[in-house]
Image (tube, rainbow, N blue to C red):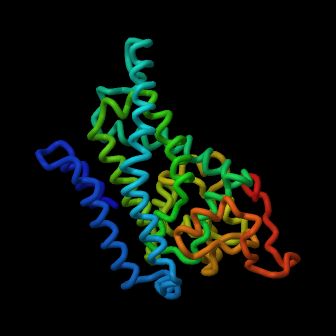
Amino acid sequence: MALTLGASISLVDTSFPQWAIVPMVTVFASVYVAVLERVQPFYEGWNRSRDDVVTDATSSLVALLVVARLVEPLFLSVLFAGSVFLSKELDSTLWPTSWPPVAQAALALFVGEFFYYWMHRWIHGARFFWRFHAVHHSSERLYWLNSARFHPIDFFLDDVAIVFPLALTGWTLHSISGLIILLTFYNCHGVTMHSNMDVRLGPLNYLVPGPEQHRWHHSRDMREANNNFGGKVVIWDLLFGTFLLPGDRIPPEDIGLADNVRLPDSYVGLLLAPFRWSKLPLRNPDPALEPKPAKSGADSV
């Protein structure tokens, strides 16, 4: 994380092509984490494919080629127009444009994460929208590639939560360098947080959500999964009482949905699953044995 973040900070104000920084550093982080998972895995079983590699790779490509290249630019163009309008009306921008790019990126991270925290927490208690987020939780192992296993509608909701308030302040218009630094951090941290690396972050667990903490969020037990909602910082979980990092036991190896439904393995099947939820097969044929969700931090599903 220090290496990738340092690389983006060092390159962003040089003659190096800005468009290449985020993909280059993200690829480096992905390869590094994928190798370390094999050398030092947390669970050996999570290194074995469960017919999910093609699905997760497809989700990554869709996120890169469709969401990032088509949907997000359209969404951002509307927000930029709103930002320009507000700046003209106020005769100024709401954002501290005189700050260094690194400081602006840090501020954007904490502001965006506040809104993301509450969106994420709300989705866990909203039955209809949970069906889209359930695509991410349907993975039955954690490894670097499923950090991008999201339904496109779930991606869009995240954008609404993170980008909308930041764009309206005018930040995205005034700090391309800060935006590149932040995107680099988001991509590389996402790969790290979902990894199967056996690492110990120690006190850093109370600063950024690493793999040690995030594994509890993917538990089938909703008393555990309804915690650790922060995507890139821990402060909002700490402040609002949803931080979970037990010291007396390790995260469960059997992870996935608490719902008594089985989501399809294919990417197309996952896209359609939220719209045909009642027709999905049961994971456990006996509904009486379905796991009982419990309230913890947010309303359970």
161 in relation to 284, above or below: above
Q: Position of residue 139 (x, y in %)?
A: 57, 73
**Left or right placement of residue 195 versus residue 65 in this view:** right
Q: Position of residue 232 (x, y in %)?
A: 47, 53
Residue sticking out furthest to the left: 15
Q: Is residue 272 visible?
A: yes
Quarter holding the C terminus is bottom right
Q: Nearer the viewer, residue 8 or 81?
A: 81
| Residue 192 occupies quadrant | bottom left
Quadrant in the picture for residue 249: bottom right
The residue shown at (77%, 80%) is 284
Q: Left or right: where does residue 71 sit relative to residue 150?
A: left
Q: Residue at x 55, y 59 (%)?
A: 151
Asked if residue 245 shows in the view, the reply is no
Q: Nearer the viewer, residue 232 or 84?
A: 84
Observer-nearest residue: 208 or 146? 146
Instruction: State the residue lying farthest toward the right.
Output: 288
